[in-house]
């Protein structure tokens, strides 16, 4: 009987300690729910400005533009060429020691816009070695131009629908 009493005592001790070694994951799940809730609500308030581009598909060609002007701005290592797809080069702006003549490009595109006021599309074609920063500057010059106004500088729209591609070799 003594052995049976010893076995009962060991079994009671074992049952008392059985839950002591388990991990309690309920607080961890609570913290994860709170973190997910916090991340979702902070993500709603962050905004990213996105400029929509009409990039050509890999296999498809550019869509046909309406009759008249098919404006292309070709950025090469030595110059920026403003051309019409059908007529050829309209104006070439050589690269100076300080960089590309973006002000001259904006002025020429402003003159083109006065001749074709309803035209909204332009294509920017880049040579392979042109840096991304130059692409952004050329896109800004093609999209808008700044004019002095009564309350400082104002922006006017030139050719906001821009497609980007590779320059012909």
Image (cartoon, helix red, strand yellow):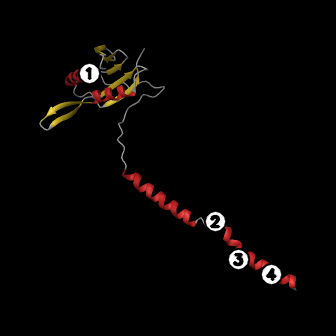
Classify 10 Å Cα crowding around label 2: few (below 14), some (14-19), many (20 and above): few
- SS under mark 4: helix
Instruction: Report the residue at 21% width, 27% height from top.
Output: 117
Given this view, does label 4 or label 1 mark the residue nearer the observer?
A: 4
Residue 165: assigned label: none
Given this view, does label 1 or label 3 mark the residue nearer the observer?
A: 3
Q: Which residue is mark 1?
A: 105
Judged left or right of residue 6, residue 157 is left
Q: Which residue is mark 3?
A: 16
CA separation in Å, label 2 and label 4: 27 Å
Q: Which residue is mark 4?
A: 8
Q: Say above or below: 136 vs 96.
A: below
CA separation in Å, label 2 and label 3: 16 Å
Q: Which residue is mark 2?
A: 23
Classify 10 Å Cα crowding around label 1: few (below 14), some (14-19), many (20 and above): many
Q: Earlier in the sequence, mark 1 or mark 3?
A: 3
Instruction: Report the residue at 14% width, 38% height from top.
Output: 151
- SS under mark 1: helix
Residue 113: image location, x then y, percent: 22, 25
Q: Earlier in the sequence, mark 2 or mark 1?
A: 2
Q: Earlier in the sequence, mark 4 or mark 3?
A: 4
CA separation in Å, label 4 and label 1: 95 Å
């Amino acid at each position: 009987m003594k052995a049976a009493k010893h076995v009962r005592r060991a079994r009671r001790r074992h049952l008392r300690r059985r839950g002591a070694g388990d991990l309690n994951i309920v607080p961890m799940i609570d913290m994860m729910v709170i973190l997910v809730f916090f991340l979702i609500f902070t993500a709603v308030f962050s905004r990213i400005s996105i400029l929509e581009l009409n990039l050509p598909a890999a296999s498809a060609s550019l869509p046909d533009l309406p009759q008249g002007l098919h404006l292309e701005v070709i950025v090469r290592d030595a110059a920026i060429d403003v051309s019409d797809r059908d007529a050829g080069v309209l104006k070439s702006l050589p690269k100076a020691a300080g960089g590309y003549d973006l002000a001259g490009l904006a002025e020429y595109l402003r003159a083109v816009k006065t001749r074709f006021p309803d035209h909204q599309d332009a294509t920017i074609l880049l040579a392979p070695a042109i840096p991304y920063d130059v692409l952004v500057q050329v896109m800004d010059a093609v999209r808008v131009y700044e004019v002095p106004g009564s309350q400082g500088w104002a922006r006017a729209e030139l050719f906001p629908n821009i497609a980007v591609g590779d320059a012909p070799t």
